[in-house]
Amino acid sequence: MSANPYETDKLVSEYLLFHYGSAEEILPASAPPGMRDALDFAVRTQAHFSECKEGRALDLGCAVGRSSYEMSRRFPKVVGIDFSHAFIKAAAAIAEGPLVYTRLDEAHLSTTLTAKLPDGIDPSGVRFEQGDAMNLRADLGTFDRVHAANLLCRLPKPEKLLKRLPELVAPGGELILATPCTWLGEFTPPENWPPGRTIDWLQTHLAGAFELLLTKDETFLIRETGRKFQWTSSQLSIWKRL
């Protein structure tokens, strides 16, 4: 395994733009409608949870924190966890004020932008910590809502997280998993990939503890330069803890 790319300034900036950038900051003037529809992924995925005004929520693989902050609109206590120290540092810093970062445009050309807390969010109930989704601390407790977007296919041993999920989600609680199913050997050894379709593999591991409520596709767009973008379709599944 190579060094963690999610600790680099380049990836932190790309994810700050991905999470907090406006359409005007992300898209070229020639962008087709499908690119615009793929914006605000970190907002859209967590929006599938039902209301839970008194509950605790967990955002696993929170990256630079947008989903965690959005979840705080409906849940009084939110914990965001990511393996990247740099991502967690950026996520926490946004609660203190605007965070300046650099958008790569072309070659040596770049633009200075600012990521800030979305309007209407009180960050006082949101806490971020660095952690390993495969080895979460034992005293983390249970949550009424657990969100893990684009995380599973970046774990060396994803089954370790799947085995822990029944302990993390309170009875009657909800779990949202989203994955583009881009299984790559550089992140997950092939022997740890699903043997068939990812959704079937999830059902096998979560059966008995969770009921599958819904599956749907949620697209997302990551801007690398002014002319290069990653457009991806993530398979989102919603589960209820039995």
Image: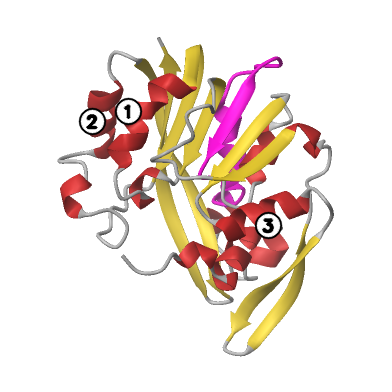
Front-lying residue, 157 or 50: 157
Structural crowding at the residue carrying mark 3, measured as other residues with C-alpha within 10 Å and reported as few (<14), some (14–19) or many (≥20): many
The quadrant in which the C terminus is found is top left
Q: Which mark is residue 200?
A: 2
Q: Residue at x 43, y 34 (%)?
A: 177
Q: CA distance from mark 2 to mark 1?
A: 16 Å
Residue behind mark 3: 90
Q: Residue at x 55, y 23 (%)?
A: 145
Structural crowding at the residue carrying mark 2, measured as other residues with C-alpha within 10 Å and reported as few (<14), some (14–19) or many (≥20): few
Q: Is residue 54 magenta?
A: yes
Please name the amino acid that badge 2 sits on.
Answer: Asp
Check the image and report above or below for 235 versus 105.
above
Q: Does residue 62 appear to the left or right of 94 in the view shown?
A: left
Please name the amino acid that badge 1 sits on.
Answer: Lys
Q: Position of residue 31 (x, y in %)?
A: 58, 65
Question: Which badge, 2 or 3, comes first in the chain's sequence?
Answer: 3
Nearer the viewer's eye, disc 2 or disc 1?
1
Check the image and report above or below for 183 versus 70.
below
Q: Residue at x 79, y 38 (%)?
A: 123
Q: CA distance from mark 1 to mark 3?
A: 29 Å
